Amino acid sequence: LAAGQASVEDERYFQETCRRVAETRDRSAAALRGLGFTVLPSLTNFLFVTHPKKEAPVIFEYLRQKNIYIRYFRLPRIENYLRITIGTDEQMDRLIDAIEPVLAGFLTVAVGVTLLSVMLPLIGILGSIG
């Protein structure tokens, strides 16, 4: 209790901690946007995110199996959103690194389907030439 009171009374420590959390939050939000996530604006110690091509419960479960815990709420209007509490830089890097494979799996499938849809007409054209 005394340590908690001392930290609240130490304005410099409080300001430095807030600055670090904000920097980590903004850096993590940018990284998630780079992976295709929609990240709602935040001035808090968490991010609220959704991905247009990967359902939130799938990402939640995938990360849980890797012992990375985020929040998922099975509630109307937010059932495809995840709440990610801002941790240390190292923790957030681990989260970003862990999310990439589950998204890459989707992207590989999407590319394969697109490639197949382009290849089938070409195969038909080439077959009619011979």
Image (cartoon, rainbow, N blue to C red):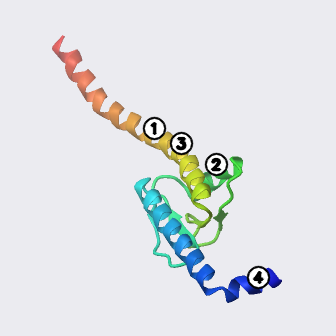
Q: Amino acid at mark 3?
A: Pro
Assess disc 3: are there few (<14), some (14-19) or many (≥20) residues with their C-alpha within 10 Å of its C-alpha.
few
* Picture quadrant of residue 36: bottom left
- Distance (Cα) linking label 1 and label 3: 12 Å
Residue 101 is marked as 3
- Distance (Cα) linking label 2 and label 1: 17 Å
Q: Amino acid at mark 2?
A: Tyr
Nearer the observer: mark 2 or 1; the answer is 2
Please say if 79 is above or below 116: below
Residue in the picture at 61% in, 86% down: 11
First along the sequence among labels 1 and 3: 3
Spot the residue most to the left: 129
Residue in the picture at 56% in, 76% down: 16
Nearer the observer: mark 4 or 3; the answer is 4
Q: Amino acid at mark 1?
A: Val
Indicate the secondary structure of the residue bearing disc 2: helix
First along the sequence among labels 2 and 3: 2
Indicate the secondary structure of the residue bearing disc 4: helix
Residue 23, position in %: x, y? 49, 69
Reading the image, the residue beneath label 4 is 4
Residue 75 is marked as none
Determine whether label 2 and label 1 are within 8 Å by CB: no
Please say if 77 is above or below 117: below
- Distance (Cα) linking label 4 and label 3: 39 Å
Reading the image, the residue beneath label 1 is 109
Spot the residue most to the right: 1
Quadrant that contains the C terminus: top left
Residue in the picture at 48% in, 42% down: 104
Reading the image, the residue beneath label 2 is 62
